[in-house]
Amino acid sequence: MTTPAFPVATIVGYPRIGRRRELKKAIEAYWAGKTSLSELELTAHELRNFTRERLVELGLGRTDASIPETFSFYDQVLDVTAAIGAVPPRFAGFEGLDLYFTLARGVGDIAPLEMTKWFDTNYHYLVPEIGPDTAFALSSRRVIDQFLEAKAAGFVTRPTLVGPVTYLLLSKAAEGAPADFNPVDRLDDVVAVYAQILAELADAGAPWVQLDEPGLVTDNIDIPAAAVTDAVKRAYDVLTSGKRPAILVTSAFGALRDNFAALAASNVEAIHVDLVHGAQPAAADGLATKTLVGGVIDGHNIWRADLGAKFDQLEALRALGAAQVTAATATSLQHVPHDTADEKWQDAELDANLHAWLAFADQKVVEVVTLARGLVQGREAIADEISASQEALASRAAANGVQVASVRERTAALSESDFHRGTYADRAAAQEEKLNLPPLPTTTIGSFPQTIDIRRARAAHARGELSTADYESAMRDEIKRVIELQESIGLDVLVHGEAERNDMVQYFAELLDGFAVTTNGWVQSYGSRCTRPSILWGDVSRPEPMTVRWATYAQSLTEKPVKGMLTGPVTIMAWSFVRDDIPLGDTANQLGLALRDEVNDLEAAGIGIIQVDEPALRELLPLRREDQQAYLDWSVGSFRLSTAGVRPETQIHTHLCYSEFGEVIGAIDGLDADVTSIEAARSKMEIVPELSEAGYARGVGPGVYDIHSPRVPSVEEVTELVELAADGVPGNLLWINPDCGLKTRGYAETVPSLEHLVAATRAVREKI
Ligand code: GLN
Ligand code: ZN
């Protein structure tokens, strides 16, 4: 086979939800039964063609396979599950796109595939369930059809699939599989179907195919690195031996390490390396005949690049002796918004600055194309673009607000004692005396249902149709309602309900200095769900209190304690685009101090219990084990900084959810909160013994009510969970609460569920 030339500029992937979330709207309309399947297919078809045209406009080639086909109706891992027919038996009877969406969302009693985080991003994929008997067969031809669709429109694009090794590394063993079974055991069978897809793509005329193997950069808990490298060799041995397009294997999110040499020694034609998150690979045998695709433009953050430094990286890559070096993004651009041109910031200076400093997906494509031109024509040819990029960076470094002396002085003056409170024994005694709570105190995690009225009021206020005074009075009415409701249900520690918050991060980003928020900067979180991360561009400080008047208003309405409610520094960072010009730990301390001011102000205003939520604590954990301790040090430190300024009798709570906390269980203890509430209902309290084994011996509120579905748990069910928790936690340390906030729920299910929670707690209290 003669290898077709690899395009000198390419990207690993592109956002697929649409500039105005067209795909989200089309999918949700289809789910709601408002449109037909053919209407949905038509919208998707138009979106794909629009994307291809746009990428050509930005400088990628129309017919040189530089455009990757990365459209997905829901998730790229689910796309492979559908393509190879790895469908668990409970989904028998479904077909086509309805099978696809049912795998993603479930229906009736049929549970969907589990969803989990895609590497260290906020994107979530659907976890395949693979067992010893899973039957694999080519079951969806979408990847081939989309190539043909592009061809019919005059493009030659590059079909893209998650690669077989990563697919199986990301899978979980199907229920009933033997304990020693690992999905990777099925590699040969899965690869056989991939080989069939590759043969069909070759028949369809695809010169290149892209197989994404980001799984090769992480440390796997169950599989030793050598076994992963072995799987790479076996898979690509088979895949390169049949009829096929030329193969590009991409990595992303880190260095390939030993897997790089394995790929270099294989017969794949091109290897992509992530030079943003990983170091330059070492020379390896076999490179002389290959294309090395230098992933130098960050696909995971939104800053404009220093093109000079990026070009240097590409030149260094050339020294490895590959047949060709080309330019690309480090990861798919699915993790950044479409286009900075869609934003207009109200403050003129900030607007000019951010437009000069930021690169969203479209700007990044242009950066790649520019670097590629330099590779072909020489550095001189892009000298102007290099200087423009460096000037933008210099202006960023010098701009107002990027380095604020008072903030820097404060973080520089921090000392060890700022991170510590007194002993827990002293705190517990002081808190018991002050709060005088019953055993097994009941509470909620913070938010109450965000009703249509609340959303309408917020939208009307944003449009200027509702005055600030009227908006705030509507929010106060809501708080009053929520306080009265909690009193009537009989909860012990109340919350104000978070009605005034559009989002638990954006709310704070709007009030802190150093942040900007976007209007159209949507990024897919999972399926049709998108988030709009805030942009943390400068040194962080708190110009004025952010939550105090809402909390004190709520407290004024009741004799019971009202918990103050804040989002923690790590979660604010995890759900924002963070700056890349100072260490993350420095930003974390700036946030820690800003929140510390808020915590102290809440205390001074008479709020005796303050919760600082860190649901994303696990989320930023680095993928490689050797980097994890440093992360845990600064993340835990910033939480402690935010909470250690209070008196012993003020009770600090934290809340964690969304993930398996196994790897960070020691860090949970390190937060040193007086009470930790944590998701636990679905796992039937698994976390309770894990926490105590890890030495955690302060208050704990394992969730006894799964808030992820509208189902109302019965009193018996909740009682069972409360008893299970009471077996593992002494009565004076056990709190009873739901798994998470109630903002996505309706009142119809919230009220009876909380009533059952209180009834169950009262029953158990009598027994202990
Ligand atoms: N206090 C927040 C709420 O109740 C916590 C949300 C979360 O953990 N994601 O909504
Ligand atoms: Zn939560």
Image (cartoon, rainbow, N blue to C red):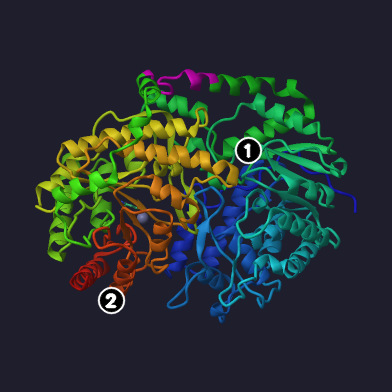
* Residue 273, horizontal then vertical, whole percent: 70, 42
Q: CA distance from mark 1 to mark 2?
A: 53 Å
Q: Which dot marks residue 714?
A: 2
Q: Is residue 169 left or right of residue 570?
A: right
Quarter of the image where one finds residue 389: top right
Callout 1, which amino acid? Val
Q: Residues within 10 Å of mark 2 (few under 14, many from 20)?
A: some
Q: Which range is magenta?
A: 394-405
Q: Is residue 15 left or right of residue 569?
A: right
**Closer to the eye: label 1 or 2:** 2
Give the residue at x 48% y 53%. Answer: 525
| SS assignment at label 2 | loop
Callout 2, which amino acid? Ser
Give the residue at x 43% y 54%. Answer: 694
Q: Which dot marks residue 595?
A: none
Task: State the residue in front, 594 or 227.
Answer: 227
Q: Quadrant of the C terminus?
A: bottom left
The numbered mark, 1 or 2, whose residue comes first in the sequence reads 1
Q: Is residue 256 magenta?
A: no
Ligand 1 contact, mark 1 (Cβ < 8 Å)? no
Q: Quadrant of the N terminus?
A: bottom right
